[in-house]
Image (cartoon, helix red, strand yellow):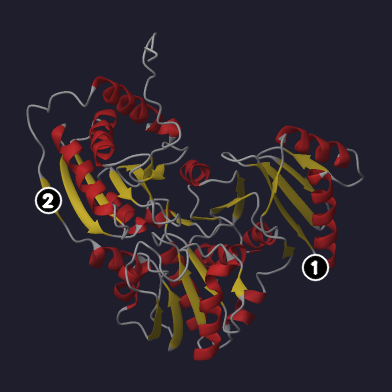
Amino acid sequence: MTVPTGPSPRTDLSGLVKAYDIRGVVPDAWDVSTAELFGAAFVEVLRADAVVTGHDMRPSSPGLARAFARGAASRGADVTETGLCSTDQLYYASGSLGLPGAMFTASHNPARYNGIKLCRAGASPVGQDTGLTEIRALVERWTDAGGAPAPAVRTGTVTARDTLAGYADCLRGLVDLSGLRPLKAVVDAGNGMGGHTVPTVLAGLPVDLVPMYFELDGTFPNHEANPLDPANIVDLRARVVAEGADLGLAFDGDADRCFVVDERGEPVSPSAITALVAARELVRHPGAAVIHNLITSRGVPEIIREAGGVPVRTRVGHSFIKAEMARTGAVFGGEHSAHYYFRDFWNADTGMLAALHVLAALGSQERPLSELTGGYERYTASGEINSAVDDRAAGLAAVREAWSGRPGVRLDELDGLTVSGADWWFNLRPSNTEPLLRLNAEARDEPAMRALRDEVLALVRS
């Protein structure tokens, strides 16, 4: 038998702790003992004397959330458990109670995954540059030492609190729904937390709700809870047409993102929803800044300017959006991935509030949704296309060289490489976690977009 020599390898949680959250397979990558350490470390790093927690419907979520609460209480923090909730409901609890928060969810990932989204009081995100690195280091150190230090002199209390009604009242207070005409809406919750929040948020409104997959089931028996994948909204599109509904709404697993389908069963791009909500918010807040990431449609900043607002372009990722929201005082922000951020909701993202804006816009006039949103769809987009490459830097360099110096062409490297002309643009950026280059292209019409897309892909894939 070979006897190991030298120091034992140290615990490394780099695969579990991501840039913005904690996420991995349960119990392979982490379990309740790890969750308890994260609860203790969260309290230590934030110096918190009280925290609030919530969890989604995944089979592992309740146990992980309880373990986190034990760890937090062991360091002297009082814990408010909201139980089952959506991620934006947890943000509401953090904002309204003024407490740091922990949401147990893996969003749209498969059932075997789980994770934690952490925030400071007021729903301010905790990421690698704002405390998550320190939390990870502390958990690694404690794991190597065999566990957390002895409990604090005072053990915190753990109490339950239902925040669903307050969350619903908060959202409905941020949108004028008084002139809403009767609407029929099909909602696909994907067996996720939308099945928990939608009935309460829409209660009492003149909305004939047709529920799809509202049963809370973290094994996702009907389809993945990721509406960004067109395969996962096939059922919704067909049901909208079959029901003769005015629109369809689809939520992801933790119900913080919302996708919209019009009365024809056709998807409405998140860029169009961003522009629609931005125009509505600018009526209430003239001249305000509005955030958009660099792969939303070019129509978004155009419409923001036409509505009297100031468009602010950012990198992709919620930490960048939220940082710019705070820096600029922006009233609203939107991403191509259907995350929507509101100043009046602690700068946090809430797909449900965006859905209420769509209902209010549609229900305050008589046109169908396809006509209403048509004015916000000015260009043709490729959607995100991934290419597996051995050398991402070489792929970017080849595209940069091919487009540099062309007349009327501009290049910038805010996030990957963006190349733009008079009525087209494309962005090529490396994945943070995989050997992929991600392409998004947009042009004035379908033929121009296809030509642009194919030219870039030919370079990347050669």
In the rendered image of this protein, does residue 272 appear above or below residue 242? above
Q: Position of residue 51 (x, y in %)?
A: 22, 43
Q: Name the residue rendered at 40%, 65% in the picture.
A: 220
For residue 402, what is the image quadrant? top right
| Residue at the spot of label 2 | 159
Q: Position of residue 164 (x, y in %)?
A: 25, 65
Q: Position of residue 170 (x, y in %)?
A: 31, 64
In the rendered image of this protein, does residue 261 appear above or below residue 230? below
Q: Nearer the viewer, residue 108 or 85?
A: 108
| Residue at the spot of label 1 | 446
Q: Residues within 10 Å of mark 2 (few under 14, many from 20)?
A: few
For residue 444, what is the image quadrant? bottom right
Q: How far apart, in angstroms, are the residues tagged by discs 1 and 2?
A: 56 Å
Which residue is situated farthest in the top direction here? 6
Three-letter code for the amino acid on which mark 2 is drawn: Thr
Secondary structure state at the residue bearing disc 2: strand
